[in-house]
Amino acid sequence: MIVEDNGCGMSKEAQANLFKPFYTTKTRGTGLGLMITLKMVTLMKGNMEINSIKDKGTSVTILIPEGTRNA
């Protein structure tokens, strides 16, 4: 899954701290959303990548492998 925007992007500081608990750039944020999302994706043996360019936008890519069924 890929989610992209063409917003203001993120600073280098924000990018470096994205997955740290309680880090937020918002006045009303908890700083837990991306940390929890990354944990869930990792538990599903997936991968999450965020690319952001200041004043250009951000792209979030989440890859989760297909599940297998036991016969």
Image: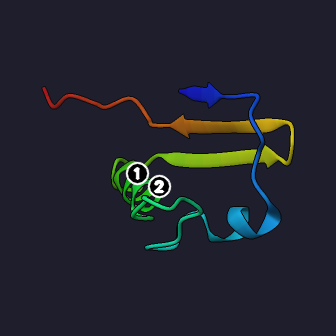
User: In this figure, which residue is indicated by the disc labeled 2?
Assistant: 34
Counting the numbered discs, the total is 2
Residue 54 left/right relative to 49: right
Q: Nearer the viewer, residue 52 or 43?
A: 52
Q: Is residue 18 above or below residue 70?
A: below
Question: In the image, what residue occupies the spot 50% across and 62% down?
Answer: 27
Q: Given contact means CB atoms under 8 Å apart, are the residues at marks 2 and 1 in contact? A: yes
The three-letter code of the residue at mark 1 reads Thr
Q: Quadrant of residue 32?
A: bottom left
Q: Secondary structure at mark 2?
A: helix
Residue 36 image position (x, y, % from top left): 36, 58
Q: Quadrant of residue 4?
A: top right
How far, Cα to Cα, is label 2 from label 1?
A: 5 Å
Q: Nearer the viewer, residue 56 or 27?
A: 27
The three-letter code of the residue at mark 2 reads Leu
Q: Secondary structure at mark 1?
A: helix
Q: Nearer the viewer, residue 60 or 41?
A: 60
User: In this figure, which residue is indicated by the disc labeled 1?
Assistant: 37
Residue 19 image position (x, y, % from top left): 53, 65
Position of the C terminus, as image quadrant, is top left
Dot 2: within a 10 Å radius of its alpha carbon, few (fewer than 14), some, or many (20 or more) residues? some
